[in-house]
Image (cartoon, rainbow, N blue to C red):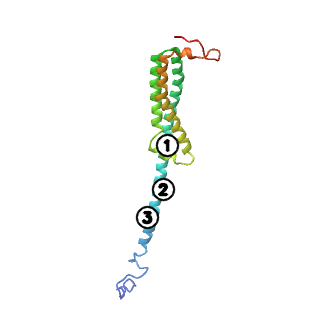
Amino acid sequence: MTSPTGGPEYSATGVPEEGSATSVRHRKPAKRRRRPLRWILFGVALLLVVGIVAVAWVGVDALRARGDLKAAATQVHVLQGQVEKGDRKAAAATLKSMQRHAAEAKAATHGPHWSAVRALPWIGPNVVAVQTVSEVIDGLAVRALPSLMEATSLVDPTTLAPVKGAASTSRHW
């Protein structure tokens, strides 16, 4: 059967002919092919964004930890001077401040984003080193230095100071 206008739009079977305006058979597969590619590209872009954000977050935390570790290192010298002078009250305040800085540095260098960045090939070993340093400094500030402070209350540190490169042999009881 042909159309009243004589065109090939209608056939005897009622099925649109190949290439006619009513044929949509060729459009659906093209859309299906592009969707997986779009999802893959979206996934890759999302992973890149998450990776960049994690590295930036670690960088900001590293700068904060660096400042806290520098402050703690400066306070070690201050603490040493205060202990040598016998100023226990000031030494206790300096120790508390140093412990706070060490704890903040340790907290800044640990977390899920640091664990994720540890797995990266070039950055990972440096991340492990920074975490180790912050853990050691925190351990010294929390465990070792308080014990040393208590020892200075029992023994005068000036009696333990070397004289002319040798330990003093005289006892002050």
Residue 126, x across and y down, in percent: 56, 41
Q: What residue type is labelled 1?
A: Ala
Disc 3 target residue: 35
Along the polypeptide, which appears first: circle 3 or circle 1?
Answer: 3
Q: In which quarter of the image is residue 27?
A: bottom left
Residue at 65 percent across and 15 percent down: it is 164
Q: Which mark is residue 83?
A: none
Badge 3 crowding class, 10 Å Cα cut-off, few under 14, some 14 to 19, many 20 or more, is few
Tell me the element at label 2: helix
- In the rendered view, tell whether residue 119 sits above or below residue 76: below
Q: Quadrant of residue 81?
A: top right
Front-most of residues 122 and 138: 138
Name the kind of residue labelled 2 in the image.
Val
Location of residue 149 with respect to 43 vertically, above or below? above
Q: How far apart, in angstroms, are the residues tagged by discs 3 and 1?
A: 31 Å
Where does the image place residue 148, in percent across and percent down from the top left? 49, 23
Q: Is residue 53 above or below residue 164?
A: below
Sequence-first disc among 2 and 1: 2
- Looking at this view, is 168 or 98 the one in front? 168
Give the alpha-carbon distance from disc 2 to disc 3, as whole Å.
Answer: 14 Å
Q: Residue placed at 47% from the left, 24% from the top?
A: 147
Determine which residue is flagged by label 1: 56
The residue labelled by disc 2 is 44
Q: Which of marks 2 and 3 is nearer the N terminus?
A: 3
> Looking at the image, do the residues carrying marks 2 and 3 touch, with CB atoms under 8 Å apart?
no
Mark 2 in CB contact with mark 1 (< 8 angstroms): no
Query: Three-letter amino acid code at disc 3?
Result: Arg
Nearer to the camera, 145 or 46 = 145
Q: What element does badge 3 sit on?
A: helix
